[in-house]
Image (cartoon, rainbow, N blue to C red):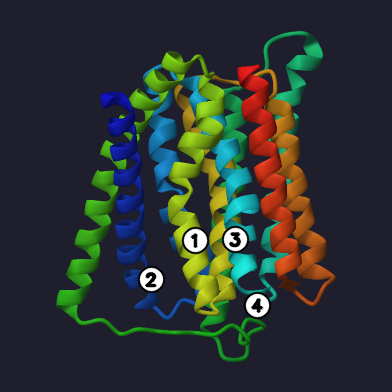
Amino acid sequence: MITPLLLALGLVMLLLGGTILVRGASEIAYRYGVSPLIVGLTIVAFGTSAPELAVNIYGPLQGATDLAFGNVVGSNISNMGLVLGAAALLTPITIQGQVVRREVPLLLLAITVVTVMALDVPLDGREAFISRSEAIVLMLLFLIFVYVNVLDFTQARRPDSLFADIEHTPLVKTEPRSRVSWILVVAGIMLLVLGGDMTVQHGSALALRFGVSETVIGLFIVAVGTSLPELATSVIAAVRRESDLALGNVVGSCIFNSLVVLPASAMISNIPIPQLGIGDLVLSWFLAAILIPVFIFRKATMGRRTGFFLVVIYVGYAMARILGDTA
């Protein structure tokens, strides 16, 4: 009885820590007049992905490497299926900025690279895993992503740039308010570290108790739990008609998961790919591929029908994965 309660407490700490971190970091970013889309792709996305990073650092340190893989891939599937689908069900997501037409293909590239890395070893007849050398390659790709967004930030501040169509909402903060924002960031990180430790320990214990594999626990219980910040942020953003922020949060979080969270785990210990892991990666690739025609060829709008389709895919996948694991 205590283990499920402590697991729930760990997830609550992750949610609270991610929320506090996003709030503090966003206030600091807005002081410099950053657009909602760029904030969504970077500060908000990285902040809401901090729970995944916390879990995936503690996981390998405690030997729960299967949990680390399931958390990353499960979070990506949850973000693109459940989170984005739920946001689009509430209100159609329309993207004004042209920059997202580059970020979505970059997400597809990131997932493709991870999938290829997971396939190279099985072709040799050995156990599949993500190695430290492959982790370095993924992190280099992330540095390119950060560099491109820094260029976007500098260009977005020019009135004659191609990003002038993106809405800007600069908020000038007083010095005391700025200190409060930094305090929120530090407090959020502390909660994420503690919550990540509790989630890994008691998530693994719960898996062993019910005979469910750590991979499935990571794919759903932990992954959905650590995706709650993304879900809350994107749904609220969609309701407030901040479509750029809603999509930027999802896309940026998935990129961060693939190019930072997963390789961070692999730098600690090789991350084995479970038997059905390739299928999970292929599904995440498919969900990312759906976004390209939706936002490039359909006037950059995702309607409720597409949102419903994404949610149905996620629910069907979850049921099939859980039933297959317990059969």
Q: Residue at x 23, y 62 (%)?
A: 182
- For label 4, the crowd category at 10 Å Cα-Cα, with few meaning under 14, some 14 to 19 and many 20 or more, is many
Foreground: 10 or 312?
312
Foreground: 210 or 44?
210
Mark 1 or 3, nearer chain start: 1
- For label 1, the crowd category at 10 Å Cα-Cα, with few meaning under 14, some 14 to 19 and many 20 or more, is many
- The reply to whether callout 2 and callout 4 are in contact (CB within 8 Å) is no
How far is mark 1 from mark 2, CA to CA?
10 Å
Residue at which label 4 appears: 97
Residue at which label 1 appears: 42
Q: Residue at x 72, y 27 (%)?
A: 278
Q: Position of residue 170 (x, y in %)?
A: 40, 84
Element type where label 1 sits in the image: helix
Quadrant where the image shows the N terminus? top left
Mark 3 or 2, nearer chain start: 2
Examine the rendering and report whether any part of residue 216 can be seen: yes
How far is mark 2 from mark 4, CA to CA?
18 Å
Residue at which label 2 appears: 29
User: Mark 2 belongs to which amino acid?
Assistant: Ala
Q: Position of residue 183 (x, y in %)?
A: 19, 60
Quadrant where the image shows the C terminus? top right
Foreground: 160 or 167?
167
Left or right side of 282 for 224: left
Q: Position of residue 260 (x, y in %)?
A: 51, 42
Vertical placement of residue 164 versus 154, above or below: below
Vertical placement of residue 174 versus 251, above or below: below
Q: Quadrant of residue 274?
A: top right
Q: Residue placed farthest to the top in the image?
A: 125
Element type where label 3 sits in the image: helix
How far is mark 3 from mark 2, CA to CA?
27 Å
Vertical placement of residue 134 versus 111, above or below: above
Mark 2 or 4, nearer chain start: 2
